[in-house]
Image (cartoon, rainbow, N blue to C red):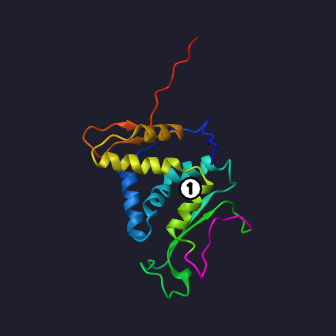
């Protein structure tokens, strides 16, 4: 996108690594064919979703993601005539139903509300790098490694602290100590 989000004035958000991993697993179970379902699960976590809306209001009046209930999508989609009955997601930019108010929609002729299509819109049209950083850092902690420098920098930029509650050593990632002003 080329621009950076304005995070001035935002309070720091603390999220436990176990919550991030649970959200990713829960969404993967709900939508097993969606490769991007774990990232959407993290994004739909209450604290993460609120931060995503806060940083994206400078781009869109009312960014939101609507979870569409329905049947589990088939692995092979051949011969399906009505895609509206399958679960998925819709990325909206505004509350109205006017033109350009959403990235994707539920259509009968195409699975346009899939996890992949929705995540494509999120990556192209919103500030969302912190979602990847959160999920990646939590997975690294689960594997016994520290988050990367890039993940920690991204979390710090978005004023998010990832609390390690899954390893014995513990720790906080993305937190920057407050600088003392020189007088």
Between 132 and 86, the one nearer to me in the picture: 132
Between 132 and 17, the one nearer to me in the picture: 132
Place of residue 44 in the rendered image (x, y in percent of width and height, measured from the top left): 50, 58
7 lies left or right of 97: left
Residue at 55% x, 64% y is: 118
Place of residue 54 in the rendered image (x, y in percent of width and height, measured from the top left): 61, 48
Place of residue 142 in the rendered image (x, y in percent of width and height, measured from the top left): 30, 49
Residue 120's quadrant in the figure? bottom right
Q: Residue furthest right?
A: 98
Place of residue 26 in the rendered image (x, y in percent of width and height, measured from the top left): 39, 63
Between 150 and 65, the one nearer to me in the picture: 150
Q: Determine if the magenta segment contains residue 107.
A: yes
Residue at 51% x, 66% y is: 116
The kind of secondary structure the magenta stretch mainly shows is loop
User: Total number of numbered labels?
Assistant: 1
Q: Residue furthest left?
A: 168
The quadrant in which the C terminus is found is top right
Rendered view: 89 above or below 153:
below
110 lies left or right of 29: right
């Amino acid at each position: 996108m080329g621009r950076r989000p304005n995070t001035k004035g935002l309070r720091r958000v603390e999220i436990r690594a176990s919550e991030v991993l649970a959200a990713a697993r829960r969404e993967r179970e709900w939508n097993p064919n969606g490769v991007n379902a774990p990232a959407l699960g993290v994004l739909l976590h209450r604290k993460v979703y609120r931060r995503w809306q806060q940083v994206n209001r400078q781009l869109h009046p009312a960014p939101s993601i609507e979870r569409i209930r329905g049947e589990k999508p088939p692995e092979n989609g051949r011969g399906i005539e009505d895609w509206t009955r399958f679960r998925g997601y819709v990325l909206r930019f505004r509350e109205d139903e006017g033109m350009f108010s959403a990235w994707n929609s539920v259509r009968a002729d195409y699975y346009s509300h899939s996890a992949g299509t929705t995540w494509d819109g999120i990556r192209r049209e919103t500030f969302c790098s912190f979602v990847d950083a959160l999920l990646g850092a939590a997975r690294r902690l689960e594997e016994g490694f520290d988050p990367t420098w890039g993940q920690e920098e991204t979390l710090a930029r978005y004023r998010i602290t990832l609390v390690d509650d899954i390893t014995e050593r513990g720790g906080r990632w993305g937190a920057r100590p407050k600088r003392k002003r020189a007088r």
